[in-house]
Amino acid sequence: MQSAVQQPLDGLTQLVNHVADKKILPDPQLFKAPKQAEFGSGGWLAETIGSGLGAAIPYMAVEVATRGALGKAGSMAEGTGVMRAINMSTEEAATAGNLAKALRFAAPAGKMAVNGAVFGLVLTPSSDASQGFWAQREKAAASSAITFGTMGLTGAGLMAGAEARLGLPMTNQAFALSYKGIGVRLGANALGGSVGGLASAESNSLLAGKGFATKEEVGHSMASFMVTGAALDAMHLGGDYYQAAKAVARTRELTAPPKLNPADQQMLEKMQQAHFQYFHEESDPVTGLTKDRSTDQSPASIAAVGFSLTAHGVAADHGWISREQAADYSLKVLDNLWSSKQGDDAQGTSGTHGLFYHFLDPKTGLRQGQNEVSTIDTALLMGGVLYARNYFDGASPKETQIRDLSNKLYNRVEWNWATNEDGRLSMGWTPEDGFIKSDWQAYNEAHILLLLGMGSPTHPLPATMWEKYMSTAKLTDQYGQKNLEFGPMFGHQYTQVWMDFRGKLDATNKKLGFDYFENSRRAALAQHAYAVANPQGWRGYGALDWGLTASDGPAEVTKIVDGKEREFHTYNARGFPNAPDDGTIAPTAAAASLPFAPEIVMPTLKHWLTERPEIFGHQGFADAFNPTFDSAKPSGWIDAERLGIDQGPILLMTENYRHGSIWQKMQNDANLQTALDKAGFTRRPIAAPGVNWLSQFMSGQPAS
């Protein structure tokens, strides 16, 4: 207690009174200094351990106090090369230059040295009457900076050496918090503390003009700071355990299945089954390719095929069809896609370089009309292909063939072929005009495209492309919701049909303080608030009627409504903010946001199914309706068609909300995990020993 409380108190009291030049603080003597024990005796050992533990407590107080100031300085300089090097992820460090690696390695020791200097300057008592006050404090600050800096550098070096030499994954949180990892951490920091103790004894003695320290001084200092090093790491370990348990508790809270009453379950089941009917009825009986929309002459949409492959697995889980039927369908689709001709010819091909045309003839699987080889639509297709690979995990010849074809299709895609001179992915290519000049820049639906490209084992996109893609994301703050801007809701939904972003953070998320799932939640809440506020005065908008996304619309026309000139459109990417709005509500915008914000989506779905039955049919919701365009009808203009890329997300995101089955099938996909690692995502926290129990205690939920 003398070293933990009395000495720091004496140091602080002396400093304040000296600076003020009067006795502002009292000089309470709470604990007496222990008598000097004989070197090597039991009393000496007890005193050594006590002083080591005592030094750790005030040092941690200094660390907490300086963390805010250093954090502020870091945020002010976060755009500099130094700060980027310090904050780079493990994956980035693997390919970084030597200087960047050195900065990243030395930064924690540098912080310890700064904390040590403050510790020595503020909390070390001045007791030598032959030296001036500031001279003593300066020497104490220098000695403490040397001591703690050496301690941090040595401990980090020992852990890095153990990681490299023994193959211990110290950068992996689960290992670092395991029994073995804790042992390595404590051992390395205890040894680092002993080296710091040697530096302390010698620096104190040399700075005081006494020459080299005696053997007893060195022994006492090394033993004491060995305890300090272990104690500091134990405190940090406690903080790491708390943060890990907090993250696990939050993740378990997010991933817990919803508590729905039987009526709500029945409503959602009916809704999902109706939307599956679209894929059951609008997929060609021979090729299995799914039409873009519910009209006789509609081409097949490869994005709709991706949703359809996924929908058939969900249908089998619910018993709407058998697993055998789902396997037959999936095998038919995959075989057709694999065997269809690829090449640069304008006609008679399904695509080129493994990518597919946006629209295909549903009966032949070949390009229909003039449309582009689409990078994003190929990615949505491949989302379904990889789902089929993960869903059909049985040993039967049929399911084995599904996995084989899925691998062939995914591995054939030359994602890097579509990279332009700016290092970004083009939106597409046509044989008539070459690559489309527009390329993918964040934030939008292309997360799935970048991840599938980065995870490819045959034609991978570089890890740097993720940072380049996300560098153009813009933050918006609308109706109290701060999130990355993308007006139409589909950009927040498509990727998350297959990717569970809850608890996963990349560099952008870490800066924002929330993940992409939360970003989509905020976008849905902002759209809902926009509809309630209804600043443009559209008919029907409100808390139960909302949702803007890419959808059909009533007509390309200008009309006078309620004495005001209004412009209306057909198919358009409607949204909020910074996207057009003509009063057209698309059910998929709200319904496919069910996992993000069930508290606003469930009332909307109940309202539509009970109060607007005219917008729901045997293939699910109509693509859109517009109460302003035709005020003579309860829901105004109602689209006569359904679209595969809108029906799919309703079915599949509802499934993720109710059961999480698609996310669960995809969470261990090796290619997606590779991509997440390359993009710098931290994995969902793994419960190391003790973490799960603590998270259970914090959340009040059963351990899992």
Image (cartoon, helix red, strand yellow):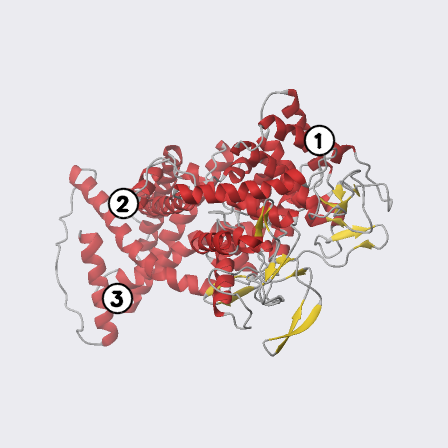
Residue type, mark 3 in image: Gln
The nearer-to-camera label among 2 and 1 is: 1
Of mark 3 and mark 2, the one earlier in the sequence is: 3
Counting residues from the start of the chain, the first of labels 2 and 1 encountered is: 2
Q: Is residue 121 left or right of residue 494?
A: left
Q: Nearer the viewer, residue 33 or 629?
A: 629
Q: Nearer the viewer, residue 443 or 385?
A: 385
**Percent of width and height locating residue 588:** 57, 53
Label 3 to label 2, Cα distance in Å?
26 Å
Disc 2 residue type (three-letter): Ser
Mark 3: give few (<14), some (14-19) or many (20+) Cα within 10 Å: few
- Crowding near the residue tagged with mark 2, few <14, some 14–19, many ≥20 C-alpha atoms within 10 Å: many
Mark 1 → mark 3, Cα distance in angstroms: 89 Å
Report which residue position mark 2 lands on: 224
Residue at (59, 40) in percent of width and height: 276
Q: Is residue 509 above or below residue 230?
A: below
Q: Which residue is mark 3?
A: 131
Give the residue number, with chain letter if any, for mark 1: 332
View extreme (bottom): residue: 563
Q: Amino acid at mark 1?
A: Lys
The quadrant of the image that shows the C terminus is top left
- Identify the element where label 2 is drawn: helix
Tag 2 near tag 1, CB within 8 Å: no
Callout 3: SS: loop
Residue drawn at point x = 66 percent, y = 31 percent: 329
Image coords of residue 428 (percent x, y)? 75, 52
